[in-house]
Image (spheres, rainbow, N blue to C red):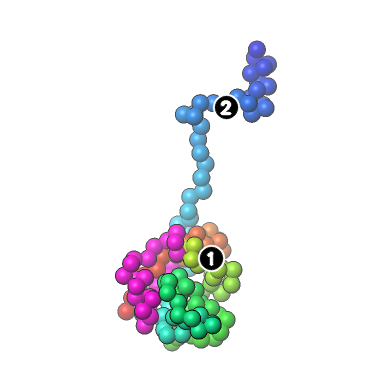
Amino acid sequence: MKALFIALIAAGVFVPPASAQSTITRAKSDHLIETYRAYIGRDDLYNSSGARLREPWQIIRQDRANFYVYGRRDRGDEADKFFADKRNRETLEAMLASGSISPSAASMIVQGDIWINVSIYGDGNIGDRLDVTVSD
């Protein structure tokens, strides 16, 4: 009987009661990768085809594309290493959804003519979330 029990455990057939099981999940990292400050100006409110952007994440992404791809930089825009990589810019929507932005900050970004502070959190060069605030 003891041999059968050991064989069942080795085969993965024996499963302990649910109360004895544990779940391993990967917590979102709170490691600050980088911060930057940028001005959201008129050029940031439109995509490269000229269509008006309506979501804060679209506008922030366009600001970074303008900075790195198109050379359209507002005075005072700061560089960041993270969004210099196009693949990282493509994750911006999901990162903002996992992070934080107040409804009033989101509204101000969509209107433009505002300074934003962006904090990028993650692990190494893999971003998990963004926290975005507005400032004077």
Q: Quadrant of the C terminus?
A: bottom left
Q: Is residue 94 above or below residue 9?
A: below
Residue 132 sits inside the magenta stretch: no
Q: Is residue 91 above or below residue 2?
A: below
Residue 82 lies left or right of residue 30; in this view the side is: right
Give me the residue at 57% from left, 27% from top. Answer: 15
Q: Position of residue 126 (x, y in %)?
A: 55, 61
Tag 1: amino acid: Thr
Residue 110 sits inside the magenta stretch: yes
- Secondary structure of the residue carrying tag 1 is loop
Give me the residue at 51% from left, 26% from top. Answer: 17
Give me the residue at 42% from left, 85% from top. Answer: 42
Q: Quadrant of the N terminus?
A: top right
Q: Position of residue 127 (x, y in %)?
A: 52, 62
Furthest-top residue in view? 1
- The Cα atoms of the two marked residues, 1 and 2, are separated by 39 Å
Residue 57 lies left or right of residue 9; in this view the side is: left
- Which range of residues does the magenta coloring cover? 96-119
Q: Position of residue 121 (x, y in %)?
A: 47, 62
